[in-house]
Amino acid sequence: MWSFSVGILNSLPSAEGARMSVDRGVEDLPEAGSAPLIIDAEFTEVEDKGMPTLDAVDEISIARARTPLELPQSGPTPVGRARVVTIINQKGGVGKTTSVINIAAQLALRGHKILVVDADSQGNCATGLGVNKSRVKTTTRDLILNPESAVESRHATAVDGVHIIVGDRTLVGLEQEMLRQLGRERRLTEALTPLLPHYDVVIIDTPPSLGLVTINALVASDGIIIPVQTEYFALEGLAMLAGTIREVRGLLNPRLGVDGVMLTMHAPTLLNEQVASEVKEAFPELLIEPAIRRNIKLAEAPSHGIPIHLHDPNSNGGQDYQKVSSVLESRWGL
Ligand SMILES: Nc1ncnc2c1ncn2[C@@H]1O[C@H](COP(=O)(O)OP(=O)(O)OP(=O)(O)O)[C@@H](O)[C@H]1O
Ligand SMILES: [Mg+2]
């Protein structure tokens, strides 16, 4: 039996390349020089004990069911500075960016000062907040490579009280560049520190991956919010995210915890309802209600460069983000 494991730090691209210990079937592999580079994959051979016993099967299913439950709760915000929150789920298209934009906008509407940091090369936060990326000179990439540029990196948005540090294509390739830098996991923390006393909340949008830029966001954060789309496979991948959080807490940021799990793109179908109750059961304390309903107005708003409260505040999506933001406002003691 072959087992395959990838850890968070060794899932980052590494100059060391592949680290494989394979004792069997070597003759089947291509020549080392012509083999494609497998990044830090570790193959280990374990003794094949035949079919697993019933006990073993039970253990596996219990472990599977238990792992996502081991999400640590976050603590309070240190006095005198912004709460830093990362919106994260390595699954793509689950509503991370939509949540960043609309939670930021809703909190600003209630008088809080918000900084959005877009750590995703897709750069959708800028578009959704009415910022023309082509006119922006200093981005999240500059912020990470040159933390002193933090103050000039901020831009105003279409929403009063929301500033943004724009993500764009220049973030592609940044992870490779950062590998050569000392303290590479703490670059964003360092860059954000002087800005924190000037805001109430800093919200970081992340790409659908657990790479070095995402790790930087976790190291800089007090809490994370995990948007979960109420579809089949919703909880797949959360075990890996939970593992990443554990490792970041253990090695780099003991403060990190989960502020909440929110349900997104929810529709009143049987499947959606079943998944929603599964998530509720798995995270009773962390769940942020109500679920954000699937709503075309939420998908339309970014094409106008505005959040939902300026596009259609009374739509289902507008009402849901308003309620979720109010839950977060009291959870964060704002
Ligand atoms: N509640 C909703 N109802 C309808 N459409 C939605 C809703 N939330 C998000 N969308 C749409 O779904 C798509 C994906 O959403 P979004 O970009 O927020 O996800 P994401 O998790 O940030 O994606 P990625 O992983 O690529 O960064 C977008 O087109 C967005 O407008
Ligand atoms: Mg996104």
Image: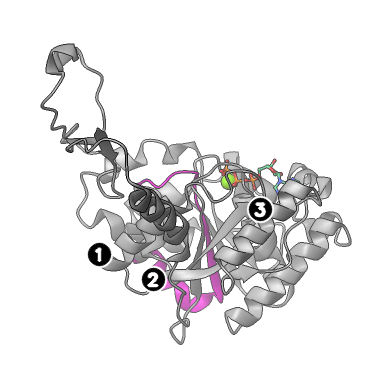
Residue drawn where x is 17% and y is 37% of the image: 47
Q: Indicate which disc, 3 or 2, sits on the residue closer to the N terminus.
A: 2
Specify whether residue 35 is in view.
yes
x, y percent for residue 39: 26, 33
- In depth, the one of 225 and 152 nearer the eye is 225
Residue assigned mark 1: 251
Judging from the image, what secondary structure is the residue with disc 1 in?
A: helix
Tell me: residue 140, above or below residue 192: above
Q: Amino acid at mark 3?
A: Val
Q: Residues within 10 Å of mark 3 (few under 14, many from 20)?
A: many
Farthest bottom residue in view: 79
Label 3 and label 2: CA atoms lie apart by 39 Å
Direction from residue 3 to residue 287 in the image, left or right: right
Residue 308 appears left or right of 196: right
- Picture quarter containing residue 40? top left
- Is residue 205 highlighted in magenta? yes
- Badge 1 amino acid: Leu
Q: CA distance from mark 1 to mark 3?
A: 33 Å
Count the marks.
3
Circles 2 and 1: CB atoms closer than 8 Å: no
Residue, disc 2: 193
Residue at image point 72% right, 50% down: 272
Magenta stretch?
190-211
Residue marked by disc 3: 275
Residue 52 in picture, x, y percent from top left: 32, 42
Tell me if label 1 and label 3 are in contact, CB under 8 Å: no
Please name the residue shown 56% across and 41% down the image.
Answer: 92
Outermost residue toward the right in this view: 314
Quadrant of image for the N terminus = top left
